[in-house]
Image (tube, coloured by chain):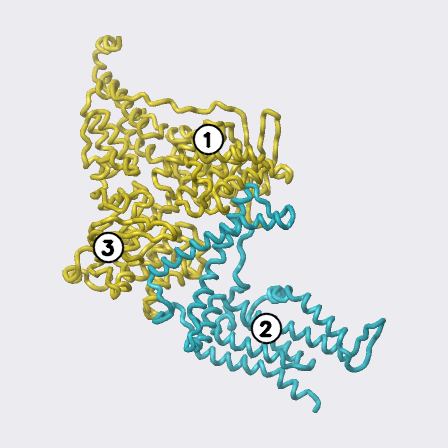
Chain colours: A yellow, B cyan
Amino acid sequence: MTEHSPKPDIELESKDAVRACDLYFSYARQDMPPVQALAGLSLSIQRGEHVVFVGRNGSGKSTLAKLINVLEAPDEGTLEVLGLNALSEDNFWSIRSRCGMVFQNPDNQIVGTSVEEDVAFGPENLGVPTPEIRRRVDDALKYVGLSEYADRLPSSLSGGQKQKLAIAGVLAMMPEVLILDESTAMLDPISRNEFLLLVERLRSEKGITVVHITHDMSEAARGKRVFVLEKGRLVMEGPPSELFLEESRMKELGLDVPVYVGVVMSLCRRLGKKPRQEYLQSVDTAIQAVRSILRDCDAKTVSDAIGTSRESVSVESTETVLQVRNLSHAYEERGEKVLCDISFSVKKGEIFSVIGHSGSGKTTLISHLNGLIRPQTGDVELFESVNSMVWNTRKNSDVKEIRKRVGLLFQYPEYQLFEETVRKDILFGPLKMGVKPEAAEDNMKEAIGLVGLDETYLERSPFELSGGQKRRVAFAGIIAMNPDILVLDEPAAGLDPVGRRDVFRYIGELRKLGKTIILVSHNMDEAARISDRMLVLSHGKAICEGTPEQLFSGRREVADFGLELPELVSFEKLLLPDYPDLNLSVYEVEEAVDEILRAAVRAGKSNDKTSHEPDPVDGEARND
Amino acid sequence: MIKDISIGRYYRGDSVLHRLDPRVKVLLFVIYMVAVFMLKTPIGMLFSFAIVTVLAILSGIPLREIIKSVRPIIFLMLFIFLINLLTIREGEVICKFWIIEITDGGVMRAVIMTLRLFLLIVSTSILLTLTTTPLKMADALESLFGPLKVIRVPVHEMAMMMSIALRFIPTLVEETDKIMKAQASRGAEYDTGNVFVRARGYVSILVPLFVSSFKRAEDLAVAMDARCYRGGEGRTKLHPLKMRSADYVWFIVLLAMAFIPMAAEWIFTPK
């Protein structure tokens, strides 16, 4: 690829990396009607372009990716990949060897028993001579920055490293098209960013066409063109900023827009301005847009536009329900400490978030909360005020009661389903916990309603449900145990925007029922929006603890702790030079717009003051 | 709960035996096994013991690790020793009480049989399991059984399955741990109650484990397809097995060593 000069090639071959016309595809299912995944899709992708596909789950994005890599063949329509007819059997291997694909689950695409063996797998299949494989493997590992791990076991890598390994495996095949099928969905923000930078580098340095499938709109904003799919059809297409202009349409399609787009659009709507595409190019253009829009408006318009954003309901409880004291944990004797002297307490009825990147010890910490792991040093205690009871996870006799009172739901809980029917699966927990059958039945019905499923699902097998529905059933299985405290580890991970919103909606409802919620997350925006208090973990240490306001608005650099601010807060921070008294402690777009407008009004007033300072009388009169 | 299991019992090192072509090691392993079984006299055993000691020194593996590999069969060794001791009635009776009679021939046979097992295990460990990674072993088997492809034995596919299995052991161990924790959070108990309750408990682990393994297998198949896997035909390798001259030399040396105890037995046995 890099050896030969690309010019003559481009003239000889098609300019398009992918050209699809009227594609139809449906999945056959046993004993059920087939599912139509693509219904007349036509599009073309240029060579060297970075395109992004977005759409709800089941909109046909992944199917298209598989068709491009000829892992599936379309039922109808024509498809050309790199100028080759993808329907002709002769071209299968040629296309596959020139299109690389990185999938969602890092673990399920690693074939080799060591890192370098895995990178070699593709070239080995292509019959590349050994010395050349060696060279390609070394180059690819160097490119993605994994050289020092060459002879490690793949299982010793982190999620982000595994995805980089997958890229290296593709790179060693010298592809012309790189397809990312939700490859970032399981990564934390830092590894996600590193991964995307690597991809961008591949595109700009090696001219590789990038086809990126994602749910994340700030990722989509990095693309040159975005395709929105809905039920197997192309419904929107264009540069990201053009699509963002149609914010309401995007929302109808179950999609989000990046935070900066939300702010600008809301501001325009309220001030009666027409939003322009150039506002929405990037965070920087958005900031400039906010400035110029506010400059153009008079004080009256601005102050009239301030909405009545509701005060967030904060919990005034002082009753401690869970206390962790000086907790430390190491998996091996004398080994590195996964948790180091952690102390915190959780109040009744609050939403308490534990924030940190993968490897920060979050999972180990929450495994202590219901006694799955017993403390090596320190204590975890549970309190109940009515009968002034205390349970300690160190005591064997207390553990059963603790597990009943602290419901714990791990990440991707779909895998914990095992019964023949949804009913039995949800009842498993309550019955094991010794809840009476009738009461358990009631709990189950309540739980299933809360997660937004109805009773028709009860007799179905959990294994025939969609991913999102399985998640709800797993959730219901914990809720039906009727715990006082719910510990939720990344409950929205891997869901599309609508799925995410649903999850946070029923977390809100649980809170209204008086449940205490401990939320584990690496998504700062979501955590800040919903939490009463947050605990930041890094490398097993508790770095800081407090309300979102204390964490983000105190002008303290949370970045010092290796964590980024919520996107909204970092956007607002960029406005601080203009409005130094801008209130940063809001985490909803509409509230943030209110604050920006308020700050603009204040700034307008003080400007008036300064300009009229030589004439204090006038100023006094105005104040009267 | 369960973490950090090592695959096989490979002991990382860079000795002559570590570097030796795994096919040579597999062949030698077979020869040593036969050789040890052919020995009948204490003299032969003594020489064999010496040879195994030399192998151990060549491998550079600490004595502690070698002893560890014998530990699991100590009871078997003891059992074989006692059975031989108590049942074989040859030569003179040394002592006798009740119906038990111990003869000098019996003692001899018991010692030889036990030593034989001991030497067998130790030489296997040194030659194969401790000095060869499971992946190399799979490669060696693929290469040695290669000729069977002619009669349509899927040798490559079997080796590929073996190496994928090795790759997924740590992943599945982690997964099992995760599922156990999740079900324990829902009140499942695996260590209390009667047999039925426990068996029922394990269902809640096994079903999810199977379901996710099938999902993984499907994903992996697609991923392998995407990376152009199409069987062993025309495939090259990053680490192809290649006999170097050193491998030939060591093969001859170690082969010769295998025959020393037999030769010694032949020389020192009165005819």
Query: What amino acid type should be assigned to the residue bearing mark 1?
Result: Leu
Q: Mark 2 points at which residue?
A: B123
Q: How far apart are marks 1 and 2 (CA)?
A: 64 Å
Q: Nearer the viewer, mark 3 or mark 2?
A: 3
Chain at numbered mark 2: B
Q: Is mark 3 on a helix, strand or loop?
A: strand
Query: Could you say which quadrant of the image residue A294 lies in?
Result: top left
Q: Which of B180 and B4 is in front in this view?
A: B180
Query: What amino acid type should be assigned to the residue bearing mark 3?
Result: Glu
Residue that appears at 67% across and 74% down: B115
Horizontal and vertical percent position of residue A309 = 33, 23
Q: Mark 3 points at which residue?
A: A76
Q: What element carries label 1?
A: helix
User: Which quadrant of the rendered structure holds the C terminus of chain B?
Assistant: bottom right
Q: Are marks 3 and 2 on the same chain?
A: no
Q: Name the residue under label 1.
A: A510
Query: What amino acid type should be assigned to the residue bearing mark 2?
Result: Ser
Describe residue A257's horizontal placement relative to residue B2 as left or right.
left
Describe residue A376's horizontal placement relative to residue A148 as left or right.
right
Horizontal and vertical percent position of residue A188 = 39, 44
Query: Could you say which quadrant of the image residue A19 lies in?
Result: bottom left
Q: Are marks 1 and 2 in contact (CB under 8 Å)?
A: no
Q: How far apart are marks 1 and 3 (CA)?
A: 47 Å
